[in-house]
Image: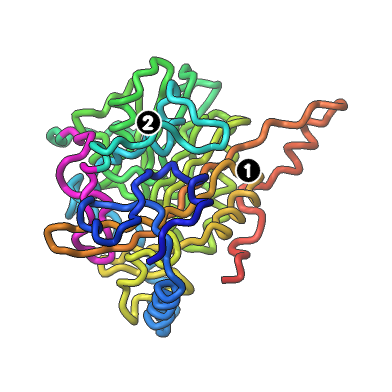
Amino acid sequence: MAAPREEAAERRPFGRRFLTDPSRLFQHNAWDHVEWSEEQEASARSQVEENSSEVLPQDKQEEYEVNAKRYWDDFYRIHENGFFKDRHWLFTEFPELAPQRIPNPTGNSVPLLSNQEEAKSEGLGSCENGHCPLQSRAGNEFSLPKTTPAKKICREELNPRDGDYPGSSASYRILEVGCGAGNTVFPILQTNNDPGLFVYCCDFSTTAVELVQNNAGYDSSRCFAFVHDLCNDQSPFPMPEGSLDVVILIFVLSAILPEKMQCIVNRLSHLLKPGGMILLRDYGRYDLAQLRFKKGQCLSDNFYVRGDGTRVYFFTQDELNHLFTTAGLEKIQNLVDRRLQVNRGKQMTMYRVWIQCKYRKPPPPQQGARGAGLQDRASSPSPCSGSSWGFGV
């Protein structure tokens, strides 16, 4: 394991705790921007080649795709809101979610976590069915309110009509895709008290959406949760195109069939206002979770099925850049976070690889001639245009 290179100083939104003295390894729970040696990367590549040497037959792959909703419903029925912990790092990495905290001109988020806040994030102890929690079960900055007894879920009309739709009067609109039990939504609602804020959140899993709607922290005057199938381009959104300031994708895109990712990113980009942003954090190539898969769990290159039937892909920076720029967005940030997590009680070290991105919808060009706006709209990518998976992986 080598010390961080000098250029890493330009990439510090994830923290400033560098391991320069190996004897101090177990003094903290995590170390930032850990550079891998050539031997370590070669070993990881070898492990991936080994665990992907047997690909599941096509009929099994189709079964996982057809039953994807059931597998996620089962996951949230079993774990409810107790598996993934609230994301206390949200406002450090993505200050766009708290508009009063402004990102610096490079796109890097400020301020960084304090040592006290970093100490609250414990290392990963184990991966259950291929799901690797990012925080421990205690010591988070935000605590998810307990669910209230089940209540009747209001099924509102999702197609916005005549400019009257949930959140239509808001001045700042955020959509989280793949909200799960609300580990992102509730910290946003608790922290951002902007009276003009409205948060939408959706999930493929009906069970997950019911957990959000039944939560004591759910406020229908500031939030609208709904079931949505991203892979179905006929599935409606409750807001019109061009109405969102931020779309959040946190460990969500990786759960989708790779061939369908471009269509989904195209659809989401159409929801953004000019200047609106997609914020993403997801699994990177050779993350611990990828290395822990066994033979017989690989669906295709870098795409696996967990023991519970849910699936996960492990990205490179170039792959994500291709997806977002093909959708007409411009890069603000595309960083790899190589973090060394430490379980001091078990004397374990765990190497995590995540990718964090911010991509912005550019403003429309100056209207130089009559009809230029129509021309511009005609030239923008349609929701399912563009290559489906043109990375050559």
Label 1 environment density (alpha carbons within 10 Å; few <14, some 14–19, many ≥20): many
Side of 355 where 74 appears, left or right? left
Above or below, 29 against 224 in this view is below
Q: Earlier in the sequence, mark 1 or mark 2?
A: 2
Please name whichever residue, 8 or 268, is drawn nearer the observer in this view of the structure. Answer: 8
Above or below, 88 against 123 in this view is above
Pick the quarter of the image with the N terminus. Answer: bottom left
Above or below, 295 against 253 in this view is below
Q: In the orientation shown, which residue stands out farthest toward the right?
A: 369
- Residue 313 in sight in this render: no
Pointer 2 residue:
156
- Residue 137 in sight in this render: yes
Q: Position of residue 223 (x, y in %)?
A: 35, 27
Amino acid at circle 1: Leu
Label 2 environment density (alpha carbons within 10 Å; few <14, some 14–19, many ≥20): few
Residue 129, quarter of picture? bottom left
Residue at screen point 66% across, 45% down: 328
Does residue 126 belong to the magenta stretch?
yes
Pick the quarter of the image with the C terminus. Answer: bottom right
Range of the magenta residues?
119-145
Does residue 280 belong to the magenta stretch?
no
Side of 334 where 55 appears, left or right? left
Residue at screen point 35% across, 35% down: 225
Residue 329: image tag: 1
Residue 212, quarter of picture? top left
- Please, what secondary structure does the residue beneath circle 2 have? loop
